[in-house]
Image (cartoon, rainbow, N blue to C red):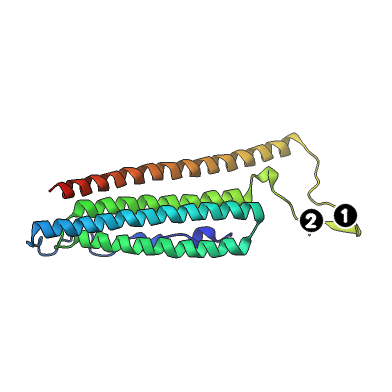
């Protein structure tokens, strides 16, 4: 699982390429307003469905990680990471296509494209920090990590001189405490970052729902 962050990173798949905001080409299309509104409605509803799929993927990832921490099934968790990566990339690709549509002359809805982009940005941050949290939890607090005795000196079959045994001094105790504090702060910061990203995503999704309600009322 060392490569987990790389496995489930979205990276460039969340970026809008080339002709971005304001690239309205030759101006907005003059096609029927009612039919265009219906198309926008369908796109926004599809976007909410995609977000639901993302939420389900996160729930599956969380469950899989808990099982991994309890049982140590490395292979099963690596396979889950690969599966989740594919799902996130597919979601990103579809949202990217929607952003491009909203920026096109047929729709001229830069506001909606920017709204979807804001969600994408927060989703990318959420994924990065989720990977960070799981990597930290896998490693454990410095003072609680298991040590390997492969480099120790074995004089008899069941006896060895452990290279990890050292005199406990005030300095070494301070080092352990500082390492633990650094670990705890990193974990808390990542958890807080995920919470902030989730809050921002939910606020943006509420804006999408307001837009859907407004279009339905027309």
> Percent x, y for residue 39?
18, 60
Q: Tell me, for residue 160, which label it has, or none.
A: 1
> Percent x, y for residue 38?
17, 57
Give the residue pinned by disc 2. 149
**Residue at 21% of width from left, 46% of height from top?**
213
Q: Quadrant of residue 148?
A: bottom right
Q: Tell me, for residue 170, which label it has, or none.
A: none
Q: Do tag 2 and tag 1 residues touch (Cβ < 8 Å)?
A: yes
**Residue at 8% of width from left, 62% of height from top?**
31
- SS class, disc 1: strand
Q: Residues within 10 Å of mark 1 (few under 14, many from 20)?
A: few
In screen coordinates, is 103 left or right of 205? Answer: left
- Observer-nearest of 5 and 218: 218
Residue 32 shows in the view:
yes
- The numbered mark, 2 or 1, whose residue comes first in the sequence reads 2
**Residue at 63% of width from left, 47% of height from top?**
140
Instruction: Name the residue at the top extreme.
Output: 170
């Amino acid at each position: 699982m060392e490569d987990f962050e790389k496995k489930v990173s979205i990276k460039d798949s969340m970026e809008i390429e080339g002709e971005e905001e304001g690239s309205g080409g030759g101006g907005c299309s003059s096609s029927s307003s009612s039919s265009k509104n219906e198309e926008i409605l369908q796109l926004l509803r599809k976007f909410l469905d995609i977000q639901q799929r993302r939420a389900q993927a996160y729930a599956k990832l969380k469950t899989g990680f808990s099982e991994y921490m309890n049982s140590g099934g490395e292979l099963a968790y690596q396979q889950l990471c690969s599966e989740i990566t594919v799902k996130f990339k597919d979601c990103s690709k579809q949202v990217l296509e929607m952003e491009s549509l909203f920026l096109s002359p047929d729709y001229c809805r830069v506001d909606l494209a920017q709204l979807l982009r804001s969600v994408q940005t927060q989703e990318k941050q959420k994924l990065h920090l989720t990977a960070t949290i799981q990597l930290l939890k896998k490693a454990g607090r410095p003072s609680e990590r298991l040590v390997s005795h492969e480099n120790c000196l074995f004089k008899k079959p069941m006896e060895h001189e452990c290279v990890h045994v050292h005199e406990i001094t005030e300095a070494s105790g301070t080092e352990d405490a500082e390492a633990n504090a650094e670990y705890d702060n990193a974990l808390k910061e990542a958890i807080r970052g995920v919470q902030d990203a989730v809050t921002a995503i939910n606020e943006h999704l509420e804006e999408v729902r307001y837009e859907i309600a407004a279009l339905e009322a027309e």
